[in-house]
Image (cartoon, coloured by chain):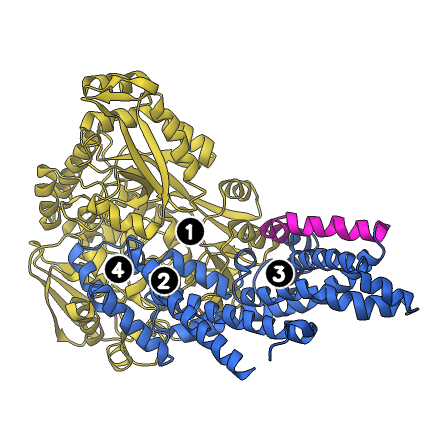
Chain colours: A yellow, B blue
């Protein structure tokens, strides 16, 4: 706590750019943690507009799929998140350096033992329907998600919440059933809806007619075509500089690149083809941000499969695959080799000292021999009369990753492992993998809590909905609940370091690479961050932009 | 005639019912459901997933789900999308169908207007320079993939010349390129058919007789050759009616048009049951009606096939 006070004093005197750099460093040394009253800023980092921001104009963004809903409960898909976040705010939000910032809350206090959180609310904040934002709205929103009858997606984040109290109009106290270190980042970042309005029209109607406290309000929504939001004059951080943000649905990546090139659009929310990304990066007419994605590109493997259940086989496979070659050949170098389930971008949590698997055919062969697999007919290894073969289901029509699977197939064949490739719809893969009905697959998935929160419970615990590899490790079963109960960042760090080491030893799935996430923005857009760790928050901050 | 119509409509109804059962079972036989996709990478527990499934009734037995759905359909309630929940499926399909229908009808009429005269003229002046030109360009129109022609047109007219928008329908200009791609493809097909069947007609005995009677060549061609040569072309046109709402998935994807094809593909990918089922049902109705209309038009064009 004392630490926090010092930080705030230090921050007050810094100009915005230095402050940003400072925050980055703060994040790096781990003040990103959940019991983070220590590093909450007095004011959100508004890097407003240097000399003379201009008023007016429309920012045009391209997405690849439709915006199917505008409700905060449907923020999963990126194209929806990007609009919903313009319209709504949360008590705290995670900024582009994974630091928790106060937004609707003017102050946050976490009990030392993690048993409660007290939020003081900003006064005079208006919803877009003109009503005032108060503690009732927070209570309503949180309780809406806590009610199992509503079966919301966000409900998970409120499992540990016991009750929400409102001692006065501008104070909210969240009492926890048990400490949950992820609550601040994953629960308190839930977007607040106006209690009376949402209560009146219901969640279903709200999906089409949202009202938040955000910098932009909904103007026109044509889900499959475009969505337009307009500046909200009474927004508490001040009216945004631009008049409109428009997001068009353009499925084809080449067409998105052409639209950027012709100036029809200012940015693309969803990546272009690698070659186009690199071309724009080299072009001075565009500002390019290149960050690491939080999701790892990986081959999940069924750990209960008779062949894949042997750790040595899985380790051999990781040795047999030349991951740098896949990056260079398939993705033109726009990715980095994965060594852990956390990307290096999660600086504080990332554990460098894990077991590594450099490309080595010899070591792969040795491990297979050690596991008892001898070379058999047709260059495929055999053990107890069983051939070393399994099937990898890639996503139907996945042109980006299919070549990757084919390269891996050749590399595995070189050490005597026969991997067959089939195609399956993504819904099938997501539902069959965790049930152990597929041997393996290939896609990208986030093995952390998102938003700078490390907890990988949803993907690594036994019976977890997204445990695609049916990974089962007694120590991890103990560590993960302990990590959530632990509110001291330094102690948490030790827990997640151990988890990363165990995963690197066990290789439950073949973690290949972290894709570079490109955000390309036309040079006419000003007010952009000088540096960033997280690609997804750049366009969220469109309220800071202006058009030159 | 009325009895014929009634029996054809009966048959059609049975076909549509079978299609509904087929689509429903196929959609539900695919392992996985929309909930997994809807949730995406959000942190989620199995318990919460089960709650969401229950909310949508996916935990109920399949036959119950089917009866509920077909019952709603019969009452004109197309149901609800799991993904775009805030909007009824009827509205989703209505909006998308308008875009696709506009695009296709426009292209349809333009291509008929171009293909028939070109095909006939090429046949009448067989082996002339004009004939070769029609044949070569129609071969190209059929052989080049739609998405490639589309992308090349965008590169030329949006990127290089800057005359037309690269995507979407901001104004009438948005229709130019997609319609051109469809026209290129359909004109090629129809012109080739028209040419072939006209050539066949020209060699018939009744044409020689007509000429022998001393009829002017123009009259021979228009009254005797073309009228008979139209039959196979009408078959194809009737068949195309069924595709008016579905045949342009690739075009819609390239030009980012919010049409029915795009909606269909997206809905299949995310296993959005009610939307896929409703679209397939709608299309099967169109196919049945398209076939019926084709048969009736046959009777008009060729009295030999007329039904009593």
User: Is disc 1 surrounded by few (<14), some (14 to 19) or many (20+) residues within 10 Å?
Assistant: some
For the residues labelled 1 and 4, say whether their Cβ atoms are less than 8 Å apart.
no
Q: Distance between the residues labelled 4 and 2?
A: 61 Å
- Kindly tell me whether residue A489 is visible in this rendering: yes
Residue A529 disc label:
1
Residue B178 disc label:
3
Vertical order, A222 against A264 (above or below) = below
Residue A42 disc label:
4
Image quadrant in which the C terminus of chain B is located: bottom right
Let me know if residue A46 is in the magenta part. no
For the residues labelled 4 and 2, say whether their Cβ atoms are less than 8 Å apart.
no
Q: How many marks?
A: 4
Query: Main structural element of the magenta stretch: helix, strand or loop?
Result: helix
Measured from the top left, where is residue A503 in percent x and y?
Answer: 19, 34
Let me know if residue B134 is in the magenta part. yes
Q: Nearer the viewer, mark 1 or mark 3?
A: 3
User: Picture quarter containing residue B180?
Assistant: bottom right
Which residue lies at the image location 27% right of the left edge and 77% below the top edge? A202
For the record, the magenta segment spans B127-152
Which residue lies at the image location 58% right of the left edge and 48% below the top edge? A285
Going from N to C along the chain, the mark reached first, 1 or 4, is: 4
Label 2 marks a residue whose chain is B
Label 1 marks a residue whose chain is A
User: Is disc 2 surrounded by few (<14), some (14 to 19) or many (20+) residues within 10 Å?
Assistant: few
User: Which one is nearer the viewer's eye here, A308 or B277?
Assistant: B277
Q: Nearer the viewer, mark 4 or mark 3?
A: 3
Measured from the top left, where is residue B105 in percent x and y?
Answer: 62, 70
Which residue lies at the image location 67% right of the left edge and 60% below the top edge? B183
């Amino acid at each position: 706590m004392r630490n926090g006070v010092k930080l705030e004093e230090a921050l007050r005197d810094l100009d915005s750019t230095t402050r940003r750099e400072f925050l980055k460093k703060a994040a790096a040394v781990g003040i990103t943690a959940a019991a983070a009253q220590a590093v909450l800023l007095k004011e959100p980092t508004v890097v407003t507009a240097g000399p003379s921001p201009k008023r007016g104009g429309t920012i045009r963004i391209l997405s690849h799929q439709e915006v199917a809903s505008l409700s905060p409960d449907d923020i999963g898909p990126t194209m929806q998140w990007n609009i919903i976040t313009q319209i709504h705010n949360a008590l705290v939000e995670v900024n582009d350096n994974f630091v928790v910032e106060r937004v609707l809350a003017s102050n946050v206090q976490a009990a030392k033992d993690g048993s409660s959180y007290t939020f003081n609310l900003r006064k005079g904040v208006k919803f877009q329907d003109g009503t005032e934002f108060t503690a009732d709205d927070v209570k309503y929103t949180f309780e809406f998600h806590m009610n199992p009858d509503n079966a919301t997606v966000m409900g998970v984040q409120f499992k540990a919440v016991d009750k929400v109290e409102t001692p006065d109009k501008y104070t909210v106290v969240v009492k926890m059933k048990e400490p949950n270190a992820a609550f601040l980042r994953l629960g308190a970042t839930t977007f607040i809806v106006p209690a009376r309005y949402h209560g009146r029209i219901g969640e279903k109607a709200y999906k089409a007619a949202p009202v938040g406290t955000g910098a932009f309000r909904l103007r026109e929504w044509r889900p499959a075509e475009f969505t337009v939001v307009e500046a909200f004059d009474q927004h508490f951080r001040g009216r945004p500089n631009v008049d409109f943000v428009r997001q068009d649905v353009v499925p084809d990546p080449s067409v998105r690149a052409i639209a950027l090139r012709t100036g029809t659009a200012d940015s693309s929310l969803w990546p272009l083809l690698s070659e186009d990304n690199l071309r724009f990066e080299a072009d001075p007419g565009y500002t390019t941000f290149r960050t690491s994605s939080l999701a790892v590109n990986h081959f999940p493997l069924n750990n209960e499969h008779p062949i894949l259940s042997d750790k040595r086989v899985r380790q051999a496979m990781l040795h047999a695959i030349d991951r740098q070659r896949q990056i260079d050949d398939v993705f033109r170098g726009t990715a980095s080799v994965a060594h852990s389930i956390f990307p290096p971008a999660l600086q504080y949590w990332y554990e460098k000292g894990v077991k590594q698997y450099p490309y080595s055919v010899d070591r792969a062969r040795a491990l297979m021999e050690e596991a008892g697999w001898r070379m058999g007919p047709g260059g495929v290894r055999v053990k107890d009369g069983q051939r070393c073969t399994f099937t990898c289901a890639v996503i139907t029509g996945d042109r980006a990753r299919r070549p990757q699977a084919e390269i891996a197939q050749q590399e595995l064949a070189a050490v005597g492992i026969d991997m067959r490739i089939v195609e399956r719809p993504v819904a099938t893969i997501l539902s069959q993998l965790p049930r152990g009905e597929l041997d393996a697959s290939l896609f990208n998935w986030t093995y952390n809590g998102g938003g700078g929160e490390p907890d990988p419970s949803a993907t690594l615990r036994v019976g977890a909905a997204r445990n695609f590899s049916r990974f089962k490790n007694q120590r991890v079963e103990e560590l993960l609940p302990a990590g959530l109960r632990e509110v001291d960042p330094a102690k948490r760090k030790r827990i997640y370091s151990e988890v990363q080491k165990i995963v690197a030893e066990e290789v439950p799935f073949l973690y290949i690479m972290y894709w570079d996430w490109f955000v390309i923005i036309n040079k006419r857009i000003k007010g952009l961050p000088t540096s960033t760790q997280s690609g997804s928050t750049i366009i969220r901050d469109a309220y800071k932009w202006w058009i030159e | 005639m009325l009895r014929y119509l009634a029996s054809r409509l009966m048959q059609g109804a049975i076909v549509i019912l079978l299609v509904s059962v087929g689509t429903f079972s196929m959609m539900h036989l695919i392992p996985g459901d929309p909930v997994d996709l809807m949730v995406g990478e959000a942190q989620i527990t199995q318990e919460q997933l089960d709650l969401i499934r229950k909310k949508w009734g996916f935990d109920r037995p399949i036959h119950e789900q089917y009866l509920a759905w077909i019952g709603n359909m019969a009452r004109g309630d197309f149901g609800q999308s799991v993904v775009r929940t805030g909007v009824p499926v009827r509205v989703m399909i209505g909006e998308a169908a308008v875009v696709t229908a506009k695009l296709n009808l426009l292209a349809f009429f333009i291509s008929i207007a171009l293909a028939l005269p070109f095909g006939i003229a090429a046949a009448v002046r067989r082996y002339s320079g004009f004939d070769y030109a029609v044949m070569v360009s129609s071969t190209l129109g059929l052989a080049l993939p739609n998405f490639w022609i589309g992308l090349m047109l965008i590169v030329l007219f949006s990127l290089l010349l800057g005359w037309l928008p690269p995507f979407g329908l901001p104004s009438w200009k948005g229709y130019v390129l997609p319609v051109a791609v469809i026209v290129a493809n359909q004109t090629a097909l129809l012109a080739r058919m028209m040419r072939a069947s006209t050539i066949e007609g020209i060699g018939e005995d009744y044409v020689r007789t007509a000429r022998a009677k001393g009829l002017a060549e123009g009259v021979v061609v228009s009254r005797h050759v073309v009228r008979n040569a139209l039959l196979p072309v009408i078959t194809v046109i009737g068949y195309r009616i069924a595709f008016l709402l579905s045949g342009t998935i690739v075009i819609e994807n390239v030009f980012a048009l919010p049409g029915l094809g795009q909606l269909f593909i997206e809905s299949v990918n995310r296993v959005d049951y009610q939307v896929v089922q409703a679209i397939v049902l709608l299309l099967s109705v169109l196919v049945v009606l398209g076939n019926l209309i084709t048969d009736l038009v046959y009777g008009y064009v060729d009295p030999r096939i007329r039904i009593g």
